[in-house]
Image: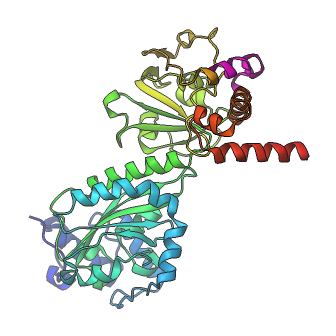
Amino acid sequence: MFTRTSGLTASDVGSNYNPLFVSTRAQRIALARQQFFEEGVRPTGLVSEAVIQSWMRCTSGRHQVAEALEFNHVSSSRMHATLARNQELLAAARQELVTMEASLSGMECRVLLTDAQGVIVHGTHNPLAAHEPLLSRATRVGVNLAESRLGTTAPGITKHTHQACTVTGAEHYFNCLQTLECAAAPIHNVQGQVAAVLDITVEGRSFNFDAASVVGMYATAIENRLLMAQSHEHVVLRFQASPALLGTPMEALAGITADGQVGWLNGVASRLLGVPAFAEGRDVATLLGLELPEVLTMTRRSGLQAMRLPNGLGVWGQANLLARDGIHFVHALAYASSDQPSHDCPSMQVMSPPVQEQSKTVMAAVQTQNSAAQEGAQARLIDHHHQLIDSTLAACAGNISRAARTLGVSRGLLYRHLRNQSADQGS
């Protein structure tokens, strides 16, 4: 059974203790602290390399392990400013946080979400706070958990490494934090940066479940939602070897830009393709084995479609075109015309019938502009959005409300389109 390291010191282990005979994790950590802090020896193999690197960063910052930490005061105005600054992140995380906290409600765990700067934007309220004196002060919205302030913690390491990790007991740099055990995982944005860190922490005991797996699963789900929310006017391709995994945290996602470049991949897609999640200069044909017209054709199909990736892996996929307001423009891709059926594409086979017409008015308007829209893979998706809006407005005799209902968008979107169009013509 795992023994918590609180109270176990280097002297308990003994200066002549043979590492080969260290029997518990607590003893390994204590020996690592003795070697690192007292003997100046790198404790390779006793604790993770990520922990060692964090200890080194903290030491270079001239922090002393015996320091008493002061958690910054959080005013009401600062708390509201923090929440306002992270509205997009919180919106993407809201559903998963509720589900996660309900799942862990019997575990006496604190669920924490920090932003890119390490500031807490969400923390679980625990009615047993009296039994958790440290967490009751450290888990308020607005408190900064950055490594520069709290030393070695799971959120701090995750921010630096972009990797999930667990930090337990005396692996924490500061002595006063050694009653904690925490597991954290990163949440990336479309630029490949760590936009947030999701963390589970307990005080005065150890996890009695695989906390790293749980926090990793929920962090992936939040990351997928955030990537989707930030993918304005991208085609988002979903795929997996098993169709049952689509719509779960195990689905692979790829964001495809208007000029046929793969702007981002989520972690699952990165592993399926064997390439980094974020890189520049990657065209969709090389990376996914699909030409842009094929991908655009997929957006007009409602069911799953079979694909063959360049590495030979067969997958099932769906594609959606997202506009700036999160609208799915399922009919905006008129240039994938009926005289170029998708089954002519060798890398893709349509396994379900075409999505039925959502509006005869929209389809008729789109068909009238097919010849003008036949620009191939180089055509910009935003141009097709504008053409679709213009055609629908014309079919609706300029009636904004009717055109908005037909397209399934807000009237504000159409008013903005008209204002921008007037400004372009004026210039």
- Chief SS of the magenta region: helix
Percent of width and height locating residue 52: 37, 69
Residue 364 shown in magenta = yes
Residue 334 shown in magenta = no
Q: Nearer the viewer, residue 366 or 315?
A: 366
Image quadrant where residue 357 sits: top right
Percent of width and height locating residue 14: 16, 81
The residue under the point 32% across, 83% down is: 137
The residue under the point 29% across, 85% down is: 176
Does residue 261 appear anywhere in the picture? no
Task: Give the vertical position of 140 relative to 366 (above or below).
Answer: below
Percent of width and height locating residue 386: 72, 35
The residue under the point 52% across, 17% down is: 347
Q: Is residue 252 left or right of residue 199?
A: right
Image quadrant where residue 397 sits: top right
Does residue 278 appear anywhere in the picture? yes
The residue under the point 35% across, 54% down is: 96
Image quadrant where residue 49 sits: bottom left
Q: Is residue 272 left or right of residue 199?
A: right
Q: Is residue 291 left or right of residue 384?
A: left
Tell me which colouring the rendered structure shows. rainbow
Q: Nearer the viewer, residue 282 or 389?
A: 389
Please state the extent of the stretch shown in magenta in the rendering.
363-377
